[in-house]
Image (cartoon, rainbow, N blue to C red):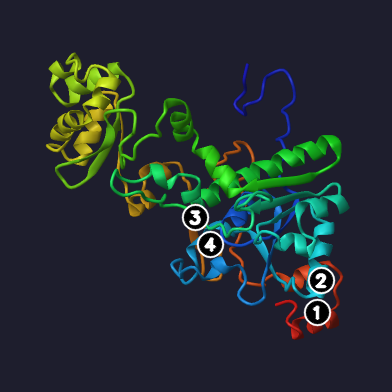
C-alpha cells in the first residue's frame, strides 16, 4: 500500500530523482542568420537548451533589428526570434573575422545560415563545404528557392514566396487575394530546419556523422499548400477564395453578433447540422430540408445556409452565441483581435506567459508550444544587444586583449 510520503510500503523510501536536463544542453549552435527563417529555427534550439551563438554584422547587425521599435524600442520580429542567444558582431568580409567564425564552427555541433544564395559558398560556409571538413557537424542551408533551378538566385522575402507558393491565391476574399498576416513562408522553413537539425543529431548519435540539411522557403510552404494542391491537381480546380469561410464545408464562417462581435462556427457533418438547426437556429425544419441536409447541398446553397445562421446569431451577443453553440456541441470560436489573444483566458489559466530580459527591460513572451512534462521549463533567455557577447566569445577562443583591441580598432568585431 502507499504511504503518506507517496512511496510503496515494505521498503526504504526512494531518493528523489535528479532534475532532468533540457534535451539539447551541451549542444552548441553557431548561426550566421538574419530576418526570420534561420533566427526562428535557432531560437527553438536555444529554448530546448542549446547554446546559440548568433553572428551579426558590426554595422547594425541582423537587419531585423531595424524593422520597427514596437517592443519598448526594440524590433518586434527580433525580440520574437532571438531570445536566449549570444550576439557576436564580426565582419565576415575581413579574413580575420571569417577565421574567427571558422574557429567557432570547428567546436560547434550545428551551424545554420540563411545568407543570400551563393554568399555562404563564397565564404566557404555552405553546408557541403563545412561538413566535408567537419564530419560530425550538422550544417543547415536555408534558402528561398533551393540551391539549383532557375529561381535559385532570386531574392526571396516572405511575401514573395507566399505568392510563388500559391498561398496568396487561396487566401482572401473572392474579389481580393491577401497574404497571410504572419510570415508563413519564414515560419514554415524555420520549423523544417528545426526538425531537420533534430533528425540529423539523432543520426549523428547512431553513425557519428552529422551532415548537411537543406531547406527552402518555397519547398516548405508548397508542402503546407497540401490541401489546395491536391484539390486542384486531382479535383480539377483549386478551392475558391472564401475569406474566413471554408471553401468546401458549410456552414464554416464568421457571423456578426448583436454586440458587434463575430463568432465563427464549424459544422463538420450532418448530425451536427441537425443539432445546429434544432438547438441554435431554432428552425428544426432545416435539418431535413434537401437544400441543407448534406454538406454538399449546404455548400451549393451557401448563401441561404449563411443567411439562416447569421439571422440566428445576429440576435445574440457573442457570449450568448458561444454559450448556445457550446451547449449544442457545435465547434465555435470568437474572432479575436491581437489584444484579445494577449488577454486570452485559456493562456492565462494554463500559465503560458513568462518574462524574458532584454536591453529594454523585461518583455512578456509565450512559453514554447513543445511541452516536456517532468523536465525543466524551456530556456527563455535574454534578447541580446548587438555584440553583447563578442568579448566573452573572443576570450573563449584564446584571443588576447591586445588582439581584441586591434580587431575592434580595425572594425573587424564590435
- State the SS at label 2: helix
Can residue 92 be spotted in the picture?
Answer: yes
Q: Residue at x 70, y 52 (%)?
A: 141
Q: Position of residue 303 (x, y in %)?
A: 19, 32
Of badges 4 and 2, nearer the viewer stands 4
Of badges 3 and 4, nearer the viewer stands 3
Q: Which residue is mark 1?
A: 404
Q: Position of residue 30 (x, y in %)?
A: 73, 58
Q: Residue at x 14, y 42 (%)?
A: 258
Categorize mark 2 by other alpha carbons within 10 Å: few (<14), some (14-19), many (20+). few
Q: Residue at x 21, y 20 (%)?
A: 292
Compare marks 1 and 2 and give the one earlier in the sequence.
Answer: 2
Q: Count all numbered tags in the image, as a single digit.
A: 4
Depth check, front residue: 349 or 404: 404
Contact, mark 1 vs mark 2 (Cβ under 8 Å) = yes
Task: Find the distance from the CA under tag 1 to the CA under tag 2.
Answer: 9 Å
- State the SS at label 4: helix
Q: Going by the image, does 74 lie left or right of 102?
A: left
Compare marks 2 and 3 and give the one earlier in the sequence.
Answer: 3
Contact, mark 4 vs mark 2 (Cβ under 8 Å) = no
Residue 361: image tag: none
Occupied quadrant, residue 240: top left
Q: Which residue is mark 4?
A: 79
Task: Find the distance from the CA under tag 2 to the CA under tag 3.
Answer: 42 Å
Q: Which residue is mark 3?
A: 160
Q: Which residue is mark 2?
A: 395
Compare marks 3 and 4 and give the one earlier in the sequence.
Answer: 4
**Quarter of the figure that contains the N terminus:** top right
Compare marks 3 and 1 and give the one earlier in the sequence.
Answer: 3
- State the SS at label 1: helix
* Residue furthest top as drawn: 288
Compare marks 4 and 2 and give the one earlier in the sequence.
Answer: 4
Amino acid at each position: 500500500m502507499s504511504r503518506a510520503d507517496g512511496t510503496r510500503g515494505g521498503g526504504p523510501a526512494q531518493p528523489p530523482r535528479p532534475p532532468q536536463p533540457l534535451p539539447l544542453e551541451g549542444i552548441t549552435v553557431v548561426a550566421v542568420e538574419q530576418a526570420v527563417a534561420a533566427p526562428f529555427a535557432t531560437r527553438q534550439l536555444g529554448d530546448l537548451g542549446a547554446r546559440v551563438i548568433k553572428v551579426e554584422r558590426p554595422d547594425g547587425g541582423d537587419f531585423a533589428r531595424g524593422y520597427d521599435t514596437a517592443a519598448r524600442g526594440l524590433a518586434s520580429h527580433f525580440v520574437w526570434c532571438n531570445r536566449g542567444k549570444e550576439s557576436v558582431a564580426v565582419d565576415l568580409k575581413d579574413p580575420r573575422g571569417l577565421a574567427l567564425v571558422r574557429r567557432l564552427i570547428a567546436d560547434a555541433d550545428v551551424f545554420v545560415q540563411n545568407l543570400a544564395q551563393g554568399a555562404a559558398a563564397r565564404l566557404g560556409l555552405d553546408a557541403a563545404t563545412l561538413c566535408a571538413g567537419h564530419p560530425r557537424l550538422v550544417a543547415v542551408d536555408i534558402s528561398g528557392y533551393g540551391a539549383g533551378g532557375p529561381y535559385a538566385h532570386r531574392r526571396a522575402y516572405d511575401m514573395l514566396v507566399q505568392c510563388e507558393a500559391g498561398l496568396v491565391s487561396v487566401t482572401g476574399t473572392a474579389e481580393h487575394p491577401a497574404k497571410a498576416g504572419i510570415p508563413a513562408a519564414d515560419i514554415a522553413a524555420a520549423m523544417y530546419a528545426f526538425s531537420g537539425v533534430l533528425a540529423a543529431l539523432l543520426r549523428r548519435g547512431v553513425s557519428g556523422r552529422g551532415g548537411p540539411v537543406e531547406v527552402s522557403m518555397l519547398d516548405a510552404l508548397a508542402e503546407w499548400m497540401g490541401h489546395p494542391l491536391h484539390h486542384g491537381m486531382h479535383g480539377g480546380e483549386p478551392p475558391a477564395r472564401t475569406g474566413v469561410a471554408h471553401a468546401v464545408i458549410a456552414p464554416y464562417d464568421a457571423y456578426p453578433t448583436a454586440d458587434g462581435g463575430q463568432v465563427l462556427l464549424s459544422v463538420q457533418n450532418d448530425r451536427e447540422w441537425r443539432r445546429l438547426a434544432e438547438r441554435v437556429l431554432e428552425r428544426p425544419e432545416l435539418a431535413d430540408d434537401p437544400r441543407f441536409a448534406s454538406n454538399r447541398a449546404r455548400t451549393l446553397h451557401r448563401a441561404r445556409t449563411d443567411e439562416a445562421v447569421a439571422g440566428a446569431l445576429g440576435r445574440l451577443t457573442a457570449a450568448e452565441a458561444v454559450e448556445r453553440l457550446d451547449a449544442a456541441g457545435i465547434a465555435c470560436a470568437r474572432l479575436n483581435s491581437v489584444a484579445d489573444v494577449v488577454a486570452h483566458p485559456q493562456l492565462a489559466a494554463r500559465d503560458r506567459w513568462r518574462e524574458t530580459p532584454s536591453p529594454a527591460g523585461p518583455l512578456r513572451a509565450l512559453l514554447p508550444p513543445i511541452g516536456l512534462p517532468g523536465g525543466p521549463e524551456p530556456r527563455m533567455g535574454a534578447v541580446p544587444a548587438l555584440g553583447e557577447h563578442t568579448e566573452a566569445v573572443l576570450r573563449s577562443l584564446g584571443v588576447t586583449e591586445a588582439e581584441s583591441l586591434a580587431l575592434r580598432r580595425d572594425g573587424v568585431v564590435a
